Image (cartoon, helix red, strand yellow):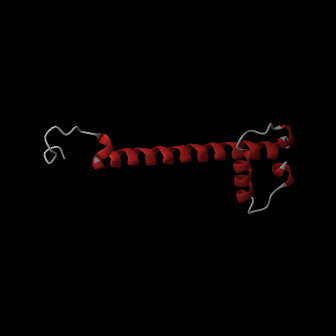
Amino acid sequence: MLAAAAPGTVYGPDTDDVVQAELAAEAAAAEREAELREAARVTTRADELQALREMGTLEQAEPREGDEAVRDELTRRAGSYVRADADT
């Protein structure tokens, strides 16, 4: 790229296709990692709530931010049936 540039041209990573491709790949990998962490969090919380349900103490659980996704996971596990204790 620099060999073909006019004399005095300043290199800028914003115009380097290789750099931009690497940045895009890093951003995509970071997004996938965040999605995997969120999925693991939802699964762990669903396991926790399912254990509380089996012990009969689910009503004592404090709701947490993001529990809507956990409720959806519990619903999926139950074959699309929403139990009243998970819904509340």
Q: Residue at x 19, y 40 (%)?
A: 9
Whole-percent x and y of residue 43? 65, 47
Residue 73 lies left or right of residue 12; in this view the side is right
Residue 24 in the figure: left or right of residue 82:
left
| Of the pair 18 and 80, the residue shown nearer to us | 18
Residue lying at 75% horizontally and 59% vertically, measured from the top left: 78
On screen, residue 67 above or below 84: above
Q: Position of residue 29 (x, y in %)?
A: 44, 46
Q: Position of residue 55 (x, y in %)?
A: 82, 42
Disc tally is 0
Query: Toward which corner of the image does residue 7 lie, by quadrant?
Result: top left
Residue at position x 60%, y 48% from top? 39
Give the residue drawn at x 80%, y 36%: 62
Q: Could you say where residue 64 lies in the image, as x and y percent from the top left?
A: 74, 38
Between 88 and 49, the residue placed more toward the observer is 88
Which of the pair 29/13 is nearer the observer?
Answer: 13
